[in-house]
Amino acid sequence: MLTRLDGIVHWMVRLVWLNTCWLGLTAAGGIVLGLGPATSAALEVTQRWMRGERDLPVGRTMWQQFRRGWRLTNAVTLLALVLCGSLVATWWLSRGLPPVPAALTQGPVLLGLLLMVALMPHLLWIAGRDVDGAPPRPAVVFTAALAIGLGRPLLTLSLLVPLIAWPLVLIASGWPGLLPVCGISVPLAAAAWCLRRTFP
């Protein structure tokens, strides 16, 4: 019983420290340019935890991954945000068109948004996989993410649901103050567990 309790406490400390490092690296990148690299670095750490590397120096490991994957993860993140933003803006502007042009515009836009939803959960872990070697081009990352997103819909859902549901659960339960403590680390740990089960 004490051993199990000790293990739970260790995991809680790991997750809080991971979240703290993620916040620090995101802020260090000026939020916009730090979000993608920091998330990719945190996901790399959680994936290594799931492979059994429990005594990682989290801060140093995340910083190294943050620096190595800076350009690719930022390119992928910013491109995804621009694509989603342009699709949403096109859909919004098409609402003022006559019915037939609006339908012809909104159909492809909604399809594009669905494809973006399918590939976005996979972008950063694919971008972070090969940073030790030659990094792939953003087009390769997007293609691979789309193939996995459509080919493994259950994996896509299992990556999306914790990311959306966990913050909502904290807010609905009256504990929004826990978001800076474990708002991103718990969904990333869940994502790493799912990825480990899918790609052992």
Image (cartoon, grey):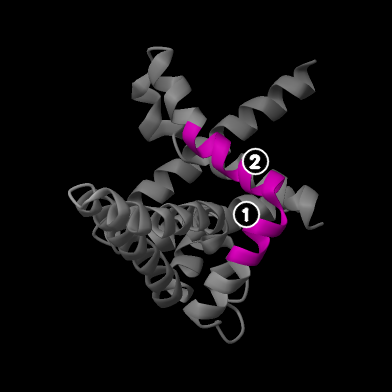
Tell me if I can see residue 128 in this picture: no
Instruction: Please provide percent x and percent y for residue 134.
Output: 58, 87
Q: Nearer the viewer, residue 51 or 61?
A: 51
* Residue at screen point 41% across, 32% down: 181
Quadrant showing the C terminus:
bottom right
**15 relative to 156 in the view: left or right:** left
**55 relative to 162 in the view: left or right:** right
* Residue at screen point 42% across, 54% down: 107
* Residue to which mark 2 is pinned: 158
* Residue at screen point 50% across, 29% down: 166
Q: Is residue 152 magenta?
A: yes
What type is the residue that disc 2 sits on? Ser
* Residue to which mark 1 is pinned: 56
Neighbor class of circle 1 (other Cα within 10 Å; few <14, some 14-19, many 20+) is some
Between label 2 and label 1, give the one nearer the viewer.
2
> Could you say which quadrant of the image residue 168 lies in?
top left
Quadrant showing the N terminus:
top right
Instruction: Please provide percent x and percent y for residue 61.
Output: 54, 62
Q: Secondary structure at mark 1?
A: loop
- Asked if labels 1 and 2 touch by Cβ distance under 8 angstroms, the answer is no
Q: Secondary structure at mark 2?
A: helix
Instruction: Please provide percent x and percent y for residue 79.
Output: 37, 69
What type is the residue that disc 1 sits on? Leu
Q: Which residues are magenta?
A: 146-164
